[in-house]
Amino acid sequence: MKWTDSLLIAEALYDKFPDIDPTKIRFTDLHNWVGELDGFDDDRHRSGEKILEAIQAAWIEEAK
């Protein structure tokens, strides 16, 4: 997975953290959690606020 794979990342986060409310997460936590996902293979410094927002939005949709 790369930072641009927001839907795949959101699905993986939903599976790994089923009890987390994605509307209440901090971007610093989200950034760390993405970097720790199995299958994540991208430069940890390539993310930004827009990417994290897209991942969070996809995770919110996944959690509905």
Image (tube, helix red, strand yellow):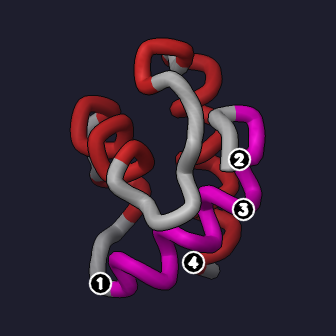
The crowd level at tag 3 (other Cα within 10 Å; few <14, some 14-19, many 20+) is: some
**Type of residue at label 4?**
Ala
Q: What kind of element bears circle 4?
A: helix
Q: CA distance from mark 4 to mark 1?
A: 10 Å
In the image, 60: left or right of 20?
right
Q: Residue at x 60, y 45 (%)?
A: 55
**Type of residue at label 1?**
Asp
Residue 6 is tagged as 2
Label pair 3/2, CB-CB below 8 angstroms: yes
Q: CA distance from mark 3 to mark 2?
A: 6 Å
Q: Which residue is mark 4?
A: 63
Return the x and y of residue 28 as percentages of the image width and height.
25, 31
| Magenta residue span | 4-18
From the viewer's side, name the closer residue of 62 and 1.
1
The tag earlier along the polypeptide, 3 or 1, is: 3
Whether residue 43 is situated above or below residue 63 in the rendered picture: above
The tag earlier along the polypeptide, 4 or 3, is: 3
The tag earlier along the polypeptide, 1 or 2, is: 2
